Image (cartoon, grey):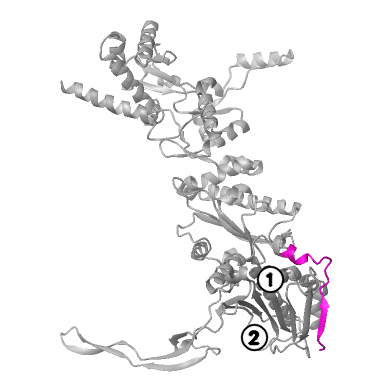
Amino acid sequence: MAEKHGSLSINSENIFPIIKKWLYSDHDIFARELISNGCDAITKLKKLDVMGEYTLPDDYKAEVQVIVNPEEKTLKFIDTGLGMTADEVEEYITQIAFSGATEFLSKYKDKTTDDQIIGHFGLGFYSAFMVADEVHIDTLSYKEGAAPVHWTCDGGTEYDMQEGNKTTVGTEITLFLNDESTEFSNEYRMREIIEKYCSFMPVNIYLSKENAPQEYETIDEAELRDDDVIVERIHEEAKTEEKENDKGEKEVVEVSPAKDKVKINKRPVSLSDPEPLWMKHPNSCTDEEYKEFYRKVFMDYKEPLFWIHLNMDYPFNLKGILYFPKINTEYDSIEGTIKLYNNQVFIADNIKEVIPEFLLLLKGVIDCPDLPLNVSRSALQNDGFVKKISEYITKKVADKLTGMCKTDRESYEKYWDDISPFIKYGCIKDSKFSDKMNDYILFKNIDGKYLTLKDCIEENRKPEAETKTEETVESTEEKKEDGAKDEKEPEKTTIFYVTDEVQQSQYINMFREAKKDAVILKHNIDSAFISHLEQKDQTIQFKRIDADLTEELRGAEAADEETSKTLTEVFRGALKNDKLEVKVENLKNEKVAAMMTLSEESRRMQDMMKMYNMYGMDPSMFGGQETLVLNAKHPLVQFVADNKDSEKTPVICEELYDLAMLSHKQLSPEEMTRFVQRSNEILLMLTK
């Protein structure tokens, strides 16, 4: 072919600065683009072979070689794909943004499918100029009689093209790295990049260092392959040892048979897995394969709880695996990783348009070739299609969870404490998901039993609320006939809950003795979740176990008014707090001297203030003051009532107050210091 000099067909001489600065967010992504193009070329050549338009050689190897040269500051990408003619180089390379894959599919649309055609060759190739001052292409087309082509460009708008000297079908791209990008000629840096972007590309990818000394390995002769380069044949004689037999006689025993081994050039190891687990049918995957894949991809050696294998062909193509990880909520950040792929090419972590927000807490991979990506393949274009994918993933997760609850309740309960943050967050964020999961949300009660929301309502519903007398029904009917409005709010069922089993143990014991139940809600998300449930169902309300004194905890008789007045005055005086709320009750449990209550509304207001860092505001502005409940039946309380002027009374009042507060919430450092000192003083009094 004649030597040719020309200009790139672009609309602006500023195209290269735009590519370098704006086309891709991360410069290392050039490696993904060039390797993807090589995979494309190989896939196309294989399809031509299947269609009978080309015959692959018997020794054909589908592979992409990446060769680093730190001394020369160069980087090579060599593929065994279909190559290009001079006209094709002109069309695909010099006319920026023309997609080779699009044209290929258009030509063969009736003969093949678009599976595994990655595409976007034009702009993908030019990402090389983000890191290179100069780029060379050497290519030889698969077409009979084609001449090799050598193309060079120094990052300007001009190129040179002439006949090359490549002798094998495929393409070799050489990058002469700029001074800011020499890191990419480092073997370990390139390995890191390839493992990040190309771990699951559909072709074997090999990395090597140019001029590196040859490495060797020794294998059994039976393992020898046709393509191995033999350096030396080694015969190992059998190994024997003198041992004593059952009769006590010594004899020579063969402990290792004779072996024929071969020293060969070390076999290259592919950095990619062309057949990742998510591309296989779920029925052909074992539990161990799922666990091994999880360990490999996420470097997490805690076994996942369970997983969901996504495998959909219609109305869109989507495959993937979502793992529910085991979380130590006390220490771990509840943040997962969803890796998004397009035809096995890594796109990004946690793209929120595709993955429902609440599922970003999971770990997994999703591969969707139909995703509408922009030219850099890094971000999604706005498309209603993306929303459909998100809805599909949500539905599959809900189906898996509800199915497990129905058919394997034991496992579901075993996993519940770990998966509940995902489910609760999902219910808050997605109303459709919430509707599907409503009957499958579990609550663990104070005895360790798991209940559904319906179970909780049944256990806590007041008997009188379940039925109406005939008289009440008739009265209601009469009102309706008269057109009168029944403005009375529906009877609410209260579900009590515990946030700290240790701190609130006193209240739990009182509930157990009164044969009342409460559920344990100690996760950070539970506060928002119960508010969500209350908004969804106006007939239920949640109260913390120390929010109120229920009828079941009180004795039959009310406390004496005079005693109540006396105790209020004494405690306010001893604690130097004239605003202290004091309530005197005859509690059924005579062992309890004092306890604290705080209304649910006030507690939630305090929680909201903490959430929004409103620490400077006084909680009492919102009625957020605790009430000290004193048990009139307890000897200590009776002593205070009968001996209000005793010198011991102030100490007893302070101690009872702090003990009640300890079961309610943490004391401040100053309060704890005073409590410990006072406790020591009381112990000293006992010694006198």
**Residue 290: horizontal and vertical position, in percent?**
52, 63
The residue at 36%/27% (across/down) is: 671
Q: Position of residue 192 (x, y in %)?
A: 55, 68
Q: Is residue 443 left or right of residue 169?
A: left
Q: Which residue is mark 1?
A: 128
- Region rendered in magenta: 1-19
Position of residue 180 measured from the top left corner of the image (x, y, whole percent): 62, 68
Q: Nearer the viewer, residue 392 or 563?
A: 563
Secondary structure under badge 1? helix
In this picture, is 55 found above or below 66? below
Give the number of the disc on residue 385. Answer: none
From the viewer's side, name the closer residue of 148 and 356: 148
Alpha-carbon span between mark 2 and mark 1: 28 Å
Number of callouts: 2
| Membership of 17 in magenta stretch | yes
Q: Which mark is residue 60?
A: 2
Q: Label 1 sits on what residue type?
A: Ala
In the displayed structure, does residue 515 sit left or right of residue 342? left
**Which residue is the extreme one toward the front?**
179
Q: Amino acid at mark 2?
A: Tyr
Q: Is residue 614 within the magenta segment?
A: no
- Point out the image quarter for the C terminus: top left
Quadrant that contains the N terminus: bottom right
Mark 2: secondary structure: loop
